[in-house]
Image (tube, helix red, strand yellow):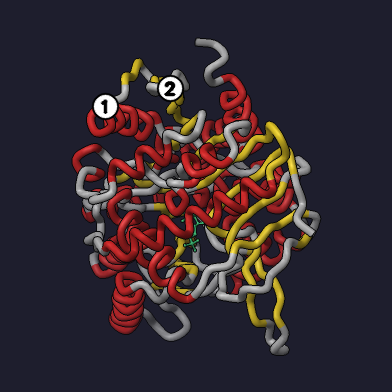
Amino acid sequence: MTQSAQLVIVANRLPVDRVELPDGSRGWRRSPGGLVSALDPVIRGSDGVWIGWAGGTETDLEPFVDDGLSLVPVSLTQQDVEEFYEGMSNATLWPIYHDVVAKPEFHREWWDTYVDVNRRYAEKAAEVAEQGATVWVHDYQLQLVPQMLRELRPDLRIGFYLHIPFPPAELFAQLPWRRQVLEGLLGADLVGFQIAGGAANFVRLVRQRVGHKTHRDVVYLPDGRTVRAAAFPISIDAQAFEELARSDSVAERSEEIRTALGNPSKVFLGIDRLDYTKGIYARLRAFSELISDGLLDVEDAVFVQVATPSRERVEQYRILRDDIDRLVGRVNGDLGRIGRPAISYLHSAYPREEMAALYRAADIMVVTPFRDGMNLVAKEYVACRYDDDGALVLSEFAGASNELRQAWLVNPYDINGMKAALLDAYRADGKERSRRMKAMRKTVLKNDVAAWAAGFLESMAQVGRDE
Ligand code: F6P
């Protein structure tokens, strides 16, 4: 049975991954990443359908309902996983879109598979969407879907949202398939970005590389259609996070965590997918130098770093994992004492309850990516600090820094600057912490994920109607 719907979400991944359970049977586990955390509450509030990959290479998965969500799996073969997901998406586009923090690889066969897989997602969406439905396509893995889908189903309203940064024209220009990607995106009525700079980069590129007329945030296509490009900063279900953080079980767990850490006076925390864009290595170095400089003491302070396994077969991610393993081993070997490691390193994924307990337990949250579309961890931390306490050290290069201006903002390439900010946040008094946290909480609670989704969907319904 294929379900049909008036709202269809198309994303690379489903919100759940097919996994082998400890007893050997097959089951489902929540997928990693900010996209799933953001979209889950959106689709729950509608009768929509979510199309995506279940994370493996099983080919016989039928549409199903999981925890109240209607899910339609797209199958990927081993070759698709290697060339579309690990290759083109995560070894070509990901580094280009993140300031070339790692060197992008270009392979023509990866591109061919990217085109094929995008077509399969578009065909699935065309099958599932009811007449005149709204289809909302997500992220860099599926940039060709809007155009392919429009060709199949001109009756649909199509939106596209990019969860990661959209690069400056100079970097995007390296992509051998730059024109095809721009044309793919132009199949949408509305193309959404995390920040205004991304939308401006896109419009400029469309003018330069495709030659369409543009005015401000609108692109005029030769067939009379218009496409709008605008910023819609993504967010979280802030209230749900706050409620979770307030629960007795999370409060208890947070106490347990601090006790297990030896009740240090200050806990620093990092929670990231293990990705080279996140700046984990540089931040741990900055922290460890504060200890070796004698400005922090392992009896007083510990850094808890949670690194969620991610894209483990992609070479750059393997290298990063080895680098971090080595750094943590060296720092703890050199600076730790019995029962007092400088860094408590966890290479694992945790459920939301555990994350909320960690946020509650952390005095200083450290979010220092070299480049990040938004970074929802920063917003989750703020949402959980209903006590108006806790300090956030945040990279200027995370989209979240546009909104969370009261964080301790840092340039993650500047190790001394990061050391100074970590120390300042460590030493800040309660009044200072509360002043900053209160202001950030106001922003996060007001601009939550429901407001983000409503803003995007309303704008999408408007495109072409008010010009
Ligand atoms: O937004 C970034 C993103 O790539 C999402 O598309 C994705 O869901 C998340 O990060 C996690 O990455 P992956 O799906 O490659 O594990």
Callout 2: 10 Å neighbours few (<14), some, many (20+)?
few
Q: Which amino acid is tagged 1? A: Gly
Residue 219 visible somewhere in the drawing: no
Residue 334 visible somewhere in the drawing: yes
The image position of residue 409, as x and y in percent, is 35, 41
The image position of residue 185, as x and y in percent, is 42, 38
Residue 211's tag is 1
Disc 2: which residue: 223
Q: Is residue 136 left or right of residue 44?
A: left
Q: Quadrant of the N terminus?
A: bottom right
Say which residue appears at 36% left-offset and 79% top-offset.
Answer: 336
The image position of residue 406, as x and y in percent, is 44, 35
- Whole-number angstrom distance, CA of label 1 to CA of label 2: 14 Å
Say which residue appears at 69% left-offset and 48% top-offset.
Answer: 128
- Give 246 or 124, whichever is nearer the viewer: 124
Say which residue appears at 47% left-offset and 45% top-offset.
Answer: 163
Residue, far top? 467
Q: Nearer the viewer, mark 1 or mark 2?
A: 2
Q: Say which label, 1 or 2, has the lower sequence index.
A: 1
Q: Which amino acid is tagged 2? A: Asp
Q: From this view, report whether residue 129 is shown above or below residue 368.
A: above
